[in-house]
C-alpha cells in the first residue's frame, strides 16, 4: 500500500485508483470482478516474486495475457523501467494462459492488465536492491504508467453530431448523423433510433446485393443487444472514441480482420474514426456473421447455417442472443479449454431459451461459471427489454 501511494503521487498523466484483494480466501477469485467494476483503461498489479524456498531465483519480469497486444505493450514499458531502476537480471516478459500463475487475473480483467514482478522477495540480493531503491522502483512504475497513458490518450473528441457523415456502405443515398454527447447506452439507442433504422436498412441492402440467396438480415434487436454488450463507456456514458481491451478504436470494437469480413473499404480497426463509420461497419460485420460461409463444422457452414437452424432462424430474439454468442466466441474452439465447440448443445440451448450462464456452465468455455457470464446474460436481457 505504501508503494502504491508513492506511485500515485508520482504519476502525472493518469488518474490512479488503488484497489486490493480482500483478505478472505476468496480474495483472488473475486478480485477481477472488483477491478472490472471500476471500468479502468488499464491495470498494473503490484507484486513481488517468490521461488520454492531455495532463494536462488532472481531478477525482474512482467506477466501479461498471452493474446493481449495492449497488455504486451504495457508489459514491455514496465519491464524496461524495472531493469533501469533496479539493475537486476532480465527475466523477460512472461505471456500467461489461464493455467499459469497469475493467469486467471490476467484472463478475467477486461482492461489491458499486467502483473509487475520487479524482484524476488525470497532472494536476499534482490530484496536488498529493492529496499535500497524503493523510490526508484516507484518512479519506474510511474514512468511506465505515464508513457502508456499518453499512448492511449484520446485525441480531441470525435465530432458526431455537428456534421453528416457520408456512408461507405450505401454512398449514393445515405448520410448519417448520430448524437452521443453525455448519453447512456439506452439513451443513445433511443435518441438515435430512426437513424439506426436507416443504417440497418442500408446494411441489409448491401448484404442482399452481395448474396444471391435470401439473407438473414441484421435486426434492431441485434443492434440493441450487441450495443448494450459491447459499447465503450467513459464514466457511464457512451464513448465514440473508446479504446477497447485489444486496442480496437470506436464505440463498438471492430475486429482486427474487419476487412476480411466487410471488404477493403473498411476503416483501420485501431485508429480514430467517425462514429457513423464505426457503426455501419460493425453492423455490416454482424450481417456477415449471419450470412458468410467461413468454414464447415459438424456439417454446418459457420456461422451462416447457425442462423438458419429450425427454432432459431426467423425468431428475432433467439437470433440476437445467438449473434451475441458468436461475437463473444462461443463457437470458436480457442475459447474452450478442451478446444472443442459443443455446437449441437449450444444450438439446443438457444432454441430452448436456456439462460446463458446456466447453459455455458456445463461447457469447457474459459469463462464458464464466472460472474462475467451472468453479466453478459443480464446485458442481453436488459437490451431486449428496452424494445
Image (tube, rainbow, N blue to C red):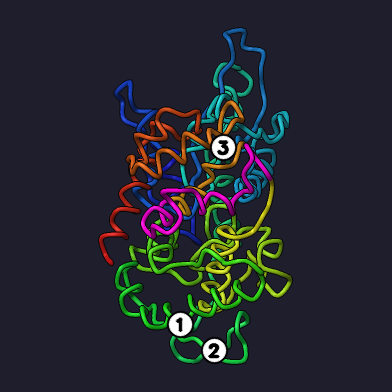
- Distance from disc 2 to disc 3, alpha carbons, whole Å, reads 38 Å
Describe residue 260's horizontal placement relative to residue 8 as left or right: right
Q: State the image coordinates of residue 69 (x, y, percent, origin top left).
A: 65, 49
Q: Residue 301 in magenta?
A: yes
> Quarter holding the C terminus?
bottom left
Q: Residue at x 51, y 70 (%)?
A: 241
Question: In the rendered structure, does residue 20 fall within the stretch colored magenta?
Answer: no
Q: Is residue 91 left or right of residue 329?
A: right
Residue identified by numbered label 3: 335
What residue would you read off at disc 1?
Answer: 198
Disc 2 or 1, which lies upstream in sequence? 2
Task: Give whichever of 105, 146 is nearer the camera.
Answer: 105
Quadrant hosting residue 121: top right
Circle 1 packing at 10 Å, graded few (<14), some (14-19), many (20+), is few
Secondary element under disc 2, as helix, strand or loop, is: loop
What residue range appears in magenta?
Answer: 296-321
Amino acid at each position: 500500500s505504501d508503494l502504491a501511494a508513492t506511485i500515485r503521487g508520482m504519476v502525472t498523466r493518469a488518474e490512479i485508483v488503488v484497489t486490493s484483494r480482500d483478505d478472505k480466501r476468496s480474495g483472488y477469485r473475486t478480485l477481477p470482478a472488483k477491478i472490472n467494476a471500476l471500468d479502468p483503461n488499464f491495470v498494473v498489479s503490484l507484486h513481488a516474486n517468490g521461488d520454492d524456498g531455495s532463494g536462488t531465483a532472481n531478477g525482474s519480469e512482467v506477466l501479461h495475457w498471452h493474446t493481449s497486444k495492449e497488455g504486451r505493450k504495457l508489459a514491455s514499458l514496465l519491464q524496461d523501467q524495472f531493469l533501469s531502476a533496479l539493475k537486476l537480471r532480465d527475466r523477460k516478459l512472461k505471456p500467461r494462459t489461464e493455467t499459469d500463475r497469475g493467469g486467471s487475473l490476467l484472463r478475467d480483467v477486461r482492461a489491458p492488465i499486467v502483473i509487475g514482478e520487479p524482484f524476488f522477495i525470497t532472494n536476499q540480493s534482490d530484496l536488498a536492491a529493492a529496499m535500497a531503491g524503493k523510490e526508484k522502483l516507484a518512479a519506474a512504475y510511474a514512468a511506465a504508467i505515464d508513457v502508456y497513458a499518453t499512448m492511449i490518450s484520446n485525441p480531441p473528441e470525435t465530432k458526431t453530431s455537428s456534421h453528416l457523415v457520408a456512408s461507405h456502405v450505401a454512398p449514393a443515398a445515405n448520410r448519417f448523423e448520430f448524437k452521443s454527447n453525455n448519453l447512456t447506452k439506452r439513451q443513445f439507442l433511443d435518441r438515435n433510433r430512426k437513424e439506426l433504422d436507416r443504417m440497418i436498412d442500408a446494411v441489409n441492402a448491401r448484404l442482399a446485393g452481395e448474396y444471391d440467396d435470401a439473407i438473414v438480415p441484421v435486426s434492431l434487436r441485434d443492434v440493441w443487444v450487441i450495443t448494450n454488450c459491447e459499447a465503450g463507456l467513459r464514466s457511464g456514458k457512451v464513448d465514440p472514441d473508446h479504446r477497447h481491451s485489444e486496442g480496437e478504436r470506436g464505440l463498438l470494437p471492430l475486429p482486427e480482420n474487419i476487412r476480411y469480413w466487410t471488404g477493403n473499404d473498411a476503416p483501420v480497426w485501431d485508429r480514430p474514426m467517425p462514429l457513423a463509420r464505426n457503426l455501419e461497419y460493425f453492423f455490416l460485420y454482424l450481417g456477415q456473421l449471419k450470412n458468410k460461409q467461413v468454414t464447415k463444422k459438424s456439417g454446418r457452414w459457420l456461422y451462416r447455417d447457425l442462423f438458419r437452424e429450425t427454432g432459431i432462424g426467423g425468431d428475432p430474439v433467439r437470433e440476437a442472443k445467438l449473434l451475441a454468442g458468436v461475437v463473444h466466441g462461443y463457437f470458436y474452439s480457442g475459447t474452450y479449454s478442451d478446444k472443442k465447440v459443443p455446437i449441437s448443445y449450444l444450438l439446443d440451448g438457444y432454441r430452448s431459451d436456456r439462460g446463458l450462464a446456466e447453459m455455458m456452465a456445463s461447457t469447457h468455455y474459459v469463462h464458464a461459471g464466472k460472474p462475467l457470464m451472468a453479466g453478459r446474460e443480464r446485458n442481453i436481457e436488459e437490451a431486449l427489454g428496452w424494445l
